[in-house]
Image (spheres, rainbow, N blue to C red):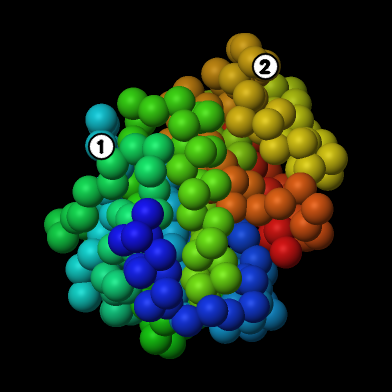
Amino acid sequence: MQNLVATLSRLPTTPRLPAVFIGHGNPMNAIEDNTYSRSWRELGERLPAPTAILCVSAHWTTSGVTMVNVKERPQTIHDFGGFPAELYAQQYPAPGAPHVARAVIDMVRSTPVEPDVEWGLDHGAWSVLIQMYPEADIPVFELSLDLARSPLAHFAIAKELKRLREKGVLIIGSGNIVHNLGMLAQNVRPYDWAVAFDAHVADALERRDFMAIVDSGSLGPVARLAHPTPEHFLPILYAIGVADESENLNSFNTSFELAAISMRSFVLS
């Protein structure tokens, strides 16, 4: 506990920053001018300026360990295939935030958090941030998703990070509320199960019933179709886990892509 108090005391106290979830969708949103990229630019302009950003991305997963990146200069990771050369040429040279990342190690007590110097910024982070903060001048670091842990365990980790919001840190979860790549289809309406799962999360958010989101697996086949694998769902739990039930909700990008990806995003403040 003494280490934690000392660590937090070294971070300046600021007005509480919002908690954000971004449905990031197609990596091409990083370079295209569309509804999503414009909304991300507007969000970056509207939010209070952070001193650092913690991004919990669907695209950094681990098994049996939670890691936090402590690099001074995280590299831009192009973790996708089959896209135009222009997308691979993109770089997001934001500095890291090792001092804040190491604070996370002290803050999280529900599971050990290990420092990492191998990862960087995957497209779940940089494809959004390149639109929100194109100058790449705000320090950014990532926390991994341990797929061996339950949704409730991830929610518990997030709750332990809540104090970072009062230390100038903008916490962003980046995934998708519905994400089933195997069921993508063009020129069709969103599937009934996709609409049902998205509506479940939207309704729980409106009621600030965060545990209903944590327990979304109870929806059975609807939940399994919405998330055949959990990595795009888990970042939602970090956005709600660092928030209070009394906070205001602003939802945006409440649409579907290719019938099986929900782009719904939200800010709690």
Where 222 sits versus 166, above or below?
A: above
- Mark 2 vs 1, N-terminal side: 1
Q: Are marks 2 and 1 in contact (CB under 8 Å)?
A: no
At a point 33% along the width and 78% down the height, the residue shown is 94
For label 1, the residue is: 65
Q: Quadrant of residue 147?
A: top left
Q: Is residue 184 left or right of residue 63?
A: right
At a point 64% along the width and 25% down the height, the residue shown is 216
Amino acid bearing label 1: Val
Residue with the most extreme front position: 2
At a point 19% along the width and 55% down the height, the residue shown is 116
At a point 35% along the width and 69% down the height, the residue shown is 6
- SS at badge 1: loop
Give how far across and how far down residue 42 sits, in percent: 67, 77
Mark 2 crowdedness (10 Å alpha carbons): few <14, some 14-19, many ≥20: few
Where 255 sits versus 14, above or below?
A: above
Amino acid bearing label 2: Leu
Mark 1 crowdedness (10 Å alpha carbons): few <14, some 14-19, many ≥20: some
Quadrant where the C terminus is found in the figure: bottom right
- Name the foreground residue: 210 vs 37: 210
Quadrant where the N terminus is found in the figure: bottom left
Circle number at residue 219: 2
Q: Quadrant of residue 213?
A: top right
